[in-house]
Structures are given as C-alpha cells and as structure tokens.
Amino acid sequence: MDTQTSAAAKKPKVDPTLATEGGSFYAETVMIHPRSVKGMFRTWKWWAMGVLLVWWHVAPFLRWDRGPGAPDQAILVDMAGRRGYFLFLEIWPQEVYYLTGLLFVAAITLFLMSSLFGRVWCGFLCWQTVYTDLFMLVERLVVGDRAKRMALDRAPWSIEKLTRKAIINLIWLVISAACGIGFTLYFGNAPTVLHDIFTGDESAATYGAIAVVGGCCFMLAGYAREQVCLYMCPYSRFQSAMLDEHSLIVTYEDWRGEPRQPARKGASFEGRGHCVDCRMCVVACPTGIDIRDGLQMGCIGCALCIDACNAVMDKNNLPRGLVTWDSIANTAARAAGAKPRYRLVRPRTIIYGAIVLVVGGLIAYSLASRRTTEVNVLHERAPLFVQLSDGSIRNGYVVKVLNMVRAERTFRLEVAGIDGATFTVVGGAANVASTDLVVAPDAVGTYNVFVTAPAGRLQAARTPLAFVLREAGEGQTTRAESLFAGPER
Amino acid sequence: MATIEKDSVSGQSTTGHEWDGIKELNTPLPKWWVYVFWACVVWSIGYWVVYPSWPTLNGYTPGIGLGSVVPANWTARGQLDGDLVAQKAGRAAWLSKIEASSVDAIEKDKDLLRYAMAGGKIAFNENCAPCHGVGGVGAYGFPTLADDEWLWGGSLADIEQTIKFGVRNTNANSRQSEMPKFGADGILKDDQIAAVADYVVSVASKAPAKGSAGEAVYAENCAVCHGEDGSGNKEVGAPALNNQIWLYKGGKDGVVAQVTKPKHGSMPAWSERLDASTVKLLAVYVHNLGGGK
C-alpha cells in the first residue's frame, strides 16, 4: 500500500472520466477509441468472445430427448407451460429456489474470482465487454484503427463519413438483432421460433423482447460502452470489497517504471525507470484510464494494457511485465527488494470457496434426491368442521397431487391418524377408506376430499391427520400432514 | 458569490457553493445522463395528451388516446367495461355448455363440474354467504348447507328448485309451509308443550321416551309432519327431529319456544335475480359442499 500512497503524492489522482472544464456540473462524454493490440491476453479475449457467442447462439438448438409429448429442447424456459427444462432436469415453478441457488453460487464464484484474480469477469466474460469488443472489431474493419476512427469522428460530415457510419451501425444492428433473437430462442422451440420470427408469425411479446434486448445491446455496446461500467454497473463500485493486497490485479510496477521518461534510441536505462511514457497502455485501454495511476474503479481487468506494454518492452529489449498481473503486496515487496509471495489461499478465498462448495453440494444433493410426487393439503376453513346427523364429524380438504413425471400415474390415497375415518372424493369414490387417484402426466391433480370421523372418535378439538399417497406398483409413499377439527371438549 | 477552488487532496475543483464553511467537490454528471432525464420528462408530457389530465372550468381535457392501445376519452370505468366484455367472451364457451346442460349432466362431466365448483363458489360467496356463511357453514336460523340434513331435500333437483324459487316468499312456486303456533294460538296447553318438548329431546338423543305423556301429544299433533319416528318430511319442509342438528336452539327450552310460537325463515327466489346458468352453478356447488344426496 506504501507504493500507492507515494504514487498518489507525486501526482494527484483524478479520474479522467470525471475531469471537467470550466467548473461545469455536467461532463461531456468523449468517445473512446482504443488502439488494438496483439498479445496473449488479446488472444484469450478473442477465444472467450468466440466461445461465449457460439454458446449463446447454439445452446437453444441443442436437443434432449424427454419422450413423447415433452419438449426436446435441451435448455428451455417454458413460460406458458410453467416449466423450466435443463437437460435431464424439469423444474416446476415452486422449485425456483434451484435458480436462486444457482444465482447465489454464481455471485459467490464471482467474489472468489475477483479476490483471486481481480475483475476477470469484467475484462473477459461480461456480455458488455464481449459485445463492446465485437462492435469495436466492426469499427476497425470498416474504418480502421484508433487514429483513423478518431480522425473520422473529427472530420466534417461527408458522403464517405456517412457511408462508413451507416455501414457500422447496420452491422451493429444485425448483431444486436441476432442477440435479441438468440434471447427469445430460450423461451420456445428454437427452430420454430426462429422460423416464425422471420415469417412474422411470432407474438408481440417475442418481437418486444427482441426490440428490448437487441436495442439495449445496440445502445450499450455501440454507444454507452465504458459508461455502462462507470455509471450503470454496481459491480465496479463494490469490487474493492472483494479485493485485498494479495489479489492479483492488473498492476503497473511503479518501482521499476519510475521515474518515467521518453527513451532515445540506444540510450541506456541506467538510473531511470523502464517506463518510456509512450502512453500505449492508455490508448489501448477500453475505459480510457491510465493504469499507471494504480488500482482504480475504471479498470475492468481486461489486461490489454499488459499486451500493449509488453510489445513496447520487447522493442526496447527490456524484460516484460512492467504492467502485469501482480498483487499490491508483491509490488511493495519488489520495491523493497524482498521476495514476492503469491498467496492464493487466504481466509477470504477459503470462505468464498467453501460457500460455493457447500451451496453447490446442497443443490446437487437436493436435485439428486428430488421427489417426483408432491402432495399439498389445504384444510377447508369454512366450515372448519360439520356435524352430521348421525353425530359424526366431517372436515373438508383440497388435496393437490403434483405428478412431476411425464407419465400417467395412479396413486392410492389413504388417511391416517383417526380410527375408522372414511373419506369422499367429490366426483369420485364416496365413504371409502382408500381410493385410487389417476393423475395426468406432468400435471397437478386437484381433489376436494371430505373426511368423516365416526361419532365419539375424536379426543380433542384438533387431531393430527395425514394424507398418505402410495404410488401403484413401486410404492413410493408421500405423506402430507394436516389437522382434523372437531367441536371443543 | 461562487468561488471555485482546487481541492488539494483529490485534485478536483469545488462547485463554488458554500454553506457555513462546508464546500462540495464538483463531481460532474455525464451529460448523456442529463439528456436521459430530460427525455423522460418529455415522455411524461405524452400522458397529458393521451390520457384525461388537466381540469378545466367545467370538466377536464379528455385525452386523444393512442390508436388501438388507449381509446380516446379513456376512463377507468370504460376500461373495466371493456375488460368485462372480454371476460364474458372468454367464458362464453363454458357458459354456453352450462346453459345447455342439466345440473345432473354438469355434475357428471369432470370439466364442467370443475368450472361449476369455481364459478359456483364465487356466486355463492356473493349471494348466499351473507346468510348461510362461507362454505355453507350456516348460522342460527340459517341452515348449514354442508351437513347431511336438508329441510327441503338434498338432491340436485331439490336444491336447484329451492334456489330458483326460494322459501316462504311471494314467488308463485316458492316453497311454502308454516308450523302452527301451538302455544300462542292455544292449541296446546303449557303442560302439554312441556311434555312434548321432553319427548322431542328424547327422540333427538335416539332414546324415545316410550309411553310418556309427550309421546301421545306428539303422535296427535306433530307426527303428521315430522313423522312417527321424528325423521321429518321434506315435502313440507318439516325438519327431522331425531338427530342433534337444530336450525334454532336445541334442548328443552328451544323446543318449547318453537312449539309455542314457531320461527320461520324465508329465502328469496333467486331465479328473479340471477340467470339460469348461475343458479345451476350454485346448485352444483351447494350439492358438493359435502351434504348432497
């Protein structure tokens, strides 16, 4: 941390995005045109972008056989049918806690990733980064690199500028539309939806979703870009809570770089810093910050400045890594001439990792032991109980049998807890001790059931009563506890 | 006046505003954010134009509407009317089936039964529950509809008939019957009433006091409607006396009161207020409250 303070003392830190001219309360936004670089991290970013975009667009087309009558899409959110399908899993609405658990694991994984390696999510995996990168590639192919793009922005409007801008926006629109369409394909049978979108047969909701998702993609990746990271995304604001002095982050090794000064060809680097102040790290940065000012909110950890700086170091026959992944503690150690220590295992990372493992294990366990039958019993409140003319007491219940299997199933219903109790299913058997209920495949069977306790059999105003459902054949038993009400004694 | 200074710690300038020596750093908002704010303000003006908004001296600006999405002269009541029409159209398929089917046919068809139970519940809670209670729980003087005793019969047809024409009202088909005022009109003397009350209580507990004075009074005056064994007569709405279910108070006092000067409930003829389909839904619903015969 000492090195940071000394760096701050040398030059007051000002977030360039917050700089203002003439005391205005509103800052002009300057379009950032980063210079493209080559290097290991750039290659990784291309790979990440490729894998993620292919996955995004191909996943809805993957098939998974679930038998007749069931959708065969591997990943499907069926809003109308109230089902979520993920490979062999079929989730009912009340099991949305699996999704909650998944999001929880994702959040803690993000924390773990950040505490280990800084904002790698932001720099490599976030859709804002992926699409912004792709949109910049389009600009580079249509106009050229940083200098040409800046020149075109400055140039007065002309046929050529108009044409190039139009081509860029057109390609962006196509990509955005594909992004929006890709989103909707997860909510219906992908090939059919894709076909219907182009024939105009899809619902207004589908076109609306495409417009909203695609429109956001176009505006956020095309025009808002780093403004999203700086002003909209909450994550950049609380990243500091995940980082500590041992987190590996994109770092400028100022002990080695300072004092910086331009290098003349062939001049010696004795007695000066290795930074030649070429500003390659600044022009390569997609958020327009200067990494040499140290850790700051604007850094999304994309590591493009590392690639940029390494190329310069190579040219000057200096060792790579003036800008590199390093921890604040290591930078301080190196500055003091001590041996750097990489501490990936720390209380923080152990706790994050443990939470991921525990919650992930709980989800896996509950999925593995997931029941395919559920019984919900609602005790009728009005009337709570009815005395019949023979003195017996009757209670009404609504029994819901959830059959989470894609096959018709027969269950034998019995009640337990009161001797001699019989029941009547409205529209079915009357005054029986047990009856068979047939529940349609993948459906909820709802039954109004009247349970009658013979006269004088109740000992208290409330008697526990269980509904026992036994599946025909295999004999999986499901119980639902309820109460039987009677007169006060 | 505003003096803009440079803050030595952050390197940022101040806004120039000062309150009791407190100064504020100028952290400028991005301009696009401000534009979005103004765009939202402009968008909100659209509501003034589309919807009724500004009061005038003798009314209000009615709003020009928005194509097929918002009609001109929009009102909340108009929206409700439209929603109700749409809802009726949505139910038409079911209601036409209900209209065309007898109550027996409705109860035998699983889908129609489910519809009738849902629709009947709503109609019941709106029209019947004020007296009979939610779920037909009943109250003093208002029969429980969920038990197995019926004054006028518990079959589907009986229930539909009772709902349609009611009990002791001005409708020509109304169910009518009155119990004589045995005490008030001097038909029976006080000691006879006391004796018959004792006998009725014994009948209710399934142990008739054979050979008692009350038995003779009962056989002469009561059995013609309530039956020799006290099992009642649904033709004339005479309740069964041989069980523990009482419309008014049970026990000797209650029986004495009823024999001396009987209370009689009445029920409207619902065919005068509800359409035939709703009456059918109600009949099926009540029949399935648990006591239907």
Image: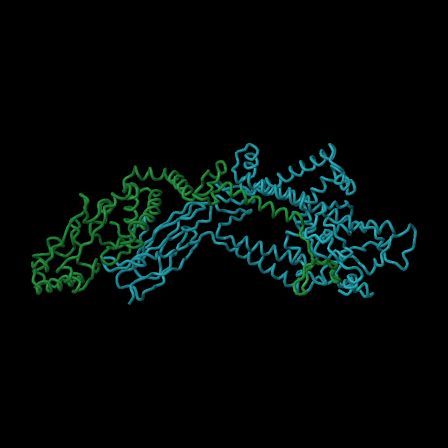
Chain colours: A cyan, B green
Image quadrant assignment for residue B86: top left
Most foreground residue, A323 or B202: A323
Is B129 drawn above or below residue B108 in the view shown? below
Residue A151: x, y in percent?
78, 40
Q: Is residue B15 left or right of residue A422?
A: right
Image quadrant assignment for residue A344: bottom right
Count of numbered tags: 0
Q: Is residue A129 left or right of residue A275?
A: left
Residue A422: x, y in percent?
30, 56
Is B36 drawn above or below residue B218 in the view shown? above
Regarding residue B135, the answer to whether it shows in the image is yes
Residue A57: x, y in percent?
62, 41
> Which quadrant is the C terminus of chain A positioned in?
bottom left
> Which quadrant is the N terminus of chain A positioned in?
bottom right
Q: In this view, does A359 lie to the left or right of A276?
A: left
Q: Is residue A106 left or right of residue A164?
A: left
Which residue lies most toward the bottom here?
A: A489
Q: In the image, what residue occupies the spot 55% across and 42% down?
A: A73
Regarding residue B211, the answer to whether it shows in the image is no
Most foreground residue, A46 or A88: A46
Most foreground residue, B235 or B202: B235
Residue A261: x, y in percent?
86, 55
